[in-house]
């Protein structure tokens, strides 16, 4: 699947992103309150379905696929004891019900593509054409597993990052002023190009990087030790399961002074280059770096750009952020924002 995530291929998704975001923003109006978390989830899933998998996003509209994902993923936010329960009214049964609805959507598309022989320049076509080491094609279950993973990773992490980005940015007037000035200078009101989004707006890039430092969506990662080693005087045998936690490591004060403060200037090009290897890992590291990193970064910056170009937003003064880990970070009560005015 790697070729599908090369820089040039990812850049081709920009038009789909802009089209979907623009359409979603058309329903906003001054005076309205928008739950940015739920709005972004539905939007990001539509983009992932179209740009990554070649789905007609409206085919699953009656299903409300974004809600199905959220309901299924909520299982992992339950207390561990509740997760162990089984039975018709258990959290596990609730998760399975929503999983089956998502599976029906995925398997229907797999069946349709296999019967028609239709192939496109998308990851579903890549998987349908793929073979294993013996030359056998992937089974429907294997294709389904990859597609569910891509849909989850392709929308849930973006939803989290965009939400926390606006939560912090709307409370940091100096950073917000720098970003809006940059958008005006670079774009002057027109739509951004992929090249500008990737490398032409360093202020926006720094805001995204700092958001990912404070709120890494994949905040914990499971690994296995390939050989014995010692860490801080603790011996770790080969084969041991080891979790890294970027939520914790991104808040080490010896690496990031005053770590709980939102400060995008930590990520000027010079300061970012000076970070120790492994200090900043919102997308993992080494050979296990997230395959969709470029896609996610482009989507986050496109959403932030188009929202800030069109509207001025305000955080409710009585809003109290409570974070949920299920399995990605998210605000427990969403993020209600008031649309103050058009930009």
Image: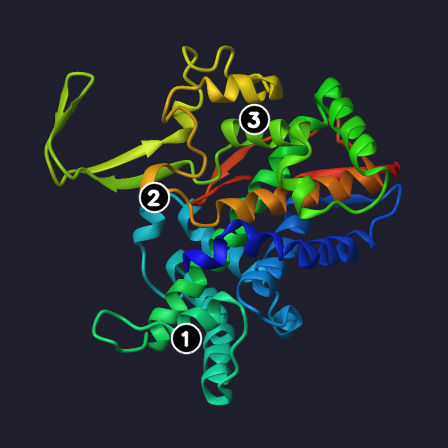
Name the residue: 48% across, 21% down: 273
- Residue 182, by quadrant, is top right
Residue placed most toward the observer, 273 or 51: 273
| Mark in the foreground, 2 or 3 | 2
Q: How crowded is mark 2: few (under 14 residues within 10 Å), some or many (20 or more)?
A: few
Q: Can residue 334 be seen in this view?
A: no
Q: In this view, does 82 lie above or below 63?
A: above
In which quadrant is the C terminus drawn? top right
Say which mark, if any, is on residue 288. 2
Residue lying farthest bottom? 115
Q: Is residue 32 above or below residue 116?
A: above
Q: Is mark 1 on a helix, strand or loop?
A: helix
Circles 2 and 3, Cβ within 8 Å, touching? The answer is no
Q: Position of residue 303 (x, y in %)?
A: 69, 45
Q: How crowded is mark 1: few (under 14 residues within 10 Å), some or many (20 or more)?
A: some
Q: Is mark 2 on a helix, strand or loop?
A: helix
Q: Is residue 57 visible?
A: yes
Q: Would residue 234 be found to the left or right of residue 310 on screen?
A: left
Residue placed most toward the observer, 85 or 197: 197
- Residue 86, by quadrant, is bottom left
Say which mark, if any, is on residue 210. 3
Q: Is residue 86 above or below residue 34?
A: below
Circles 1 and 2, Cβ within 8 Å, touching? The answer is no
Residue marked by disc 1:
128
Q: Would residue 141 be found to the left or right of residue 65 on screen?
A: left
């Amino acid at each position: 699947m790697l070729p599908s995530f090369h820089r040039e291929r990812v850049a081709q998704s920009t038009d789909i992103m802009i089209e979907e975001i623009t359409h979603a923003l058309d329903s906003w109006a001054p005076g309205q309150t928008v739950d940015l978390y739920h709005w972004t989830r539905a939007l990001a899933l539509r983009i992932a379905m179209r740009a990554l998998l070649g789905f007609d996003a409206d085919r699953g509209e009656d299903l409300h696929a974004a809600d199905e994902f959220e309901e299924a993923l909520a299982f992992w936010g339950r207390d561990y004891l509740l997760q162990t329960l089984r039975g018709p009214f258990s959290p596990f049964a609730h998760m399975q019900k929503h999983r089956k609805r998502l599976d029906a959507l995925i398997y229907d598309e797999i069946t349709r593509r296999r019967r028609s022989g239709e192939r496109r320049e998308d990851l579903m076509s890549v998987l349908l054409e793929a073979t294993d080491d013996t030359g056998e094609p992937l089974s429907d279950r294997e294709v389904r597993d990859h597609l569910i993973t891509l849909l989850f990773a392709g929308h849930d992490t973006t939803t989290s990052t965009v939400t926390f980005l606006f939560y912090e940015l709307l409370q940091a007037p100096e950073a917000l002023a720098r970003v809006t000035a940059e958008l005006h200078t670079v774009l002057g009101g027109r739509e951004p190009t992929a090249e500008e989004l990737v490398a032409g707006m360093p202020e926006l890039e720094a805001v995204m990087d700092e958001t990912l430092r404070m709120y890494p969506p994949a905040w914990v990662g499971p690994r296995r030790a390939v050989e014995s080693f010692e860490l801080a005087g603790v011996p770790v045998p080969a084969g041991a399961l080891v979790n890294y936690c970027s939520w914790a490591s991104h808040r080490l004060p010896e690496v990031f002074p005053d770590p709980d403060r939102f400060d995008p200037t930590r990520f000027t090009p010079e300061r970012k280059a000076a970070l120790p290897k492994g200090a900043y890992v919102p997308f993992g590291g080494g050979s296990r770096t997230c395959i969709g990193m470029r896609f996610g970064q482009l989507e986050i910056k496109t959403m932030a750009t188009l929202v800030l170009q069109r509207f001025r937003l305000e955080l409710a003064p009585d809003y109290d952020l409570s974070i949920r880990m299920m399995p990605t970070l998210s605000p427990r009560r969403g993020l209600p924002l008031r649309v103050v005015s058009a930009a």
